[in-house]
Image: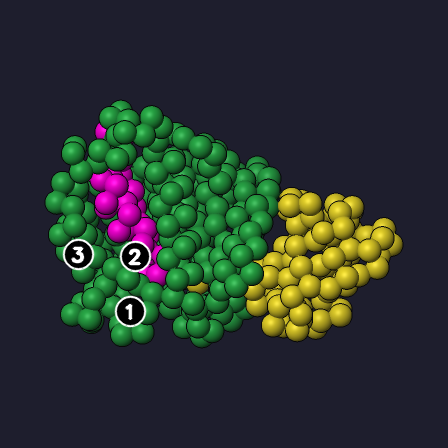
Chain colours: A green, B yellow
Amino acid sequence: MKRYSRHITLSEVGLVGQLKIAESKVLVIGAGGLGSPLLLYLTAAGVGTIGIVDFDKVSESNLQRQVLFREQDLNINKAISAKKLLNARNSDIEIKSYPHIFDTSNALDLVQDYDIVVDCTDNFRTRYLINDACVKLGKPFVFAAIYKFEGQLSVFNYKGGPTYRCLFPTPPKTGEVPNCEEVGVLGVLPGVLGMYQANEVLKIILSIGSILSGQLLSINLLTNDQRLLRFNKNKAEIESIKNRELVFIALNDCKLN
Amino acid sequence: MEITLKYYGKLVELIGKAEEVLSIEKITVKELILWLENEYPELNQLTIKIAQNNRIGLIEDPIISTNIDVFPPFSGG
């Protein structure tokens, strides 16, 4: 526990809090720009079990922002590579890699085994599926998404709070929202947002501070403008998710990772 | 009433400005979205959310705040 002494010294964490972190299970979907800093900090914090889902391989253009990976990791699956790199940083914790697409065939089984889900994906198709699986199983999910120099962050389905579909009920149409591949992104942007996600994960585990439930934090790194926008729960939307089978929305905006 | 619309993400490029001031009579959130789609046909069919006074309300709500945020969902990660 010596390695966590700076946590334990905090009255808001303490030994009890550090044990909560050690007992927690966090599923990270997407080990890319958001996932890299998030995974590094959850590993350093001693999160007891971390699951990593990513079907994709590390490519050269990832290295500009996906700071977990090194040149020698090129062409290796991200979930498998991340597990090895993170275990070298903290051998006390259990890291499970799932080198697959997160889809309707495995979503409920994966989410079921974890306390908190973190959405580090880059596409709406997976995001709506994560939302629906978390609503069905009553798990909170920590969301972030980015565009060039701007980011959005929220915590959905926290203690029965608003969900992603309460904010955006209808999935965008094909090609409506471009991804990083198409428009580019400042490398530090997913770093900032991924670390905000790690911060929300730790606050949820420790039950400290105020959680971004029912609030969308909007951040612009060019102007340093930040907004905290509040929104309400849509009970009808949540009930209809609970009452239907999981669906994968039509393939639309971009690659799946 | 004069309102200031602040645009986010892709909307800034499609509209060609980060914000603008608008003079309005009594309108609802839905009517404001219709006005935007009419003024900027590029926005047609896009998902747009409106927040006023830092709250994202219902489409039927009247516009009562002078500071309006207009934003799309982001996708990247």
The quadrant in which the N terminus of chain A is found is top left
Q: Secondary structure at mark 3?
A: helix
Residue A237 coordinates in the image, percent (x, y): 55, 43
Numbered badge on residue A85: 3
Would residue A1 be seen by someone viewing this image from the given angle? yes
Q: Of label 3 and label 2, which has the lower sequence position? A: 2
Tell me the kind of residue under disc 3.
Answer: Leu
Tell me if B31 is positioned left or right of A180 in this view: right
State which chain disc 2 sits on: A
Q: Secondary structure at mark 2?
A: helix
Residue A176 position (above or below residue A138): below
Residue bearing the label numbered 2: A36
Q: Which residues are magenta?
A: A19-48
Q: Residues within 10 Å of mark 3 (few under 14, many from 20)?
A: some
Numbered badge on residue B71: none
Tell me if A102 is positioned left or right of B64 in this view: left
Closest to the observer, B77 or A109 = B77
Measure the alpha-carbon separation of dots 3 and 2: 11 Å
The quadrant in which the C terminus of chain A is found is bottom left
Numbered badge on residue A63: 1
Tell me what residue is drawn at x 54 percent, y 68 percent. Answer: A176
Circles 3, 1 touching at the beta carbon (< 8 Å): no
Tell me what residue is drawn at x 66 percent, y 55 percent. Answer: B69
Q: Of label 3 and label 1, which has the lower sequence position? A: 1
Q: Residues within 10 Å of mark 2 (few under 14, many from 20)?
A: many
Would residue A172 be seen by someone viewing this image from the given angle? no
Measure the alpha-carbon separation of dots 2 and 1: 10 Å
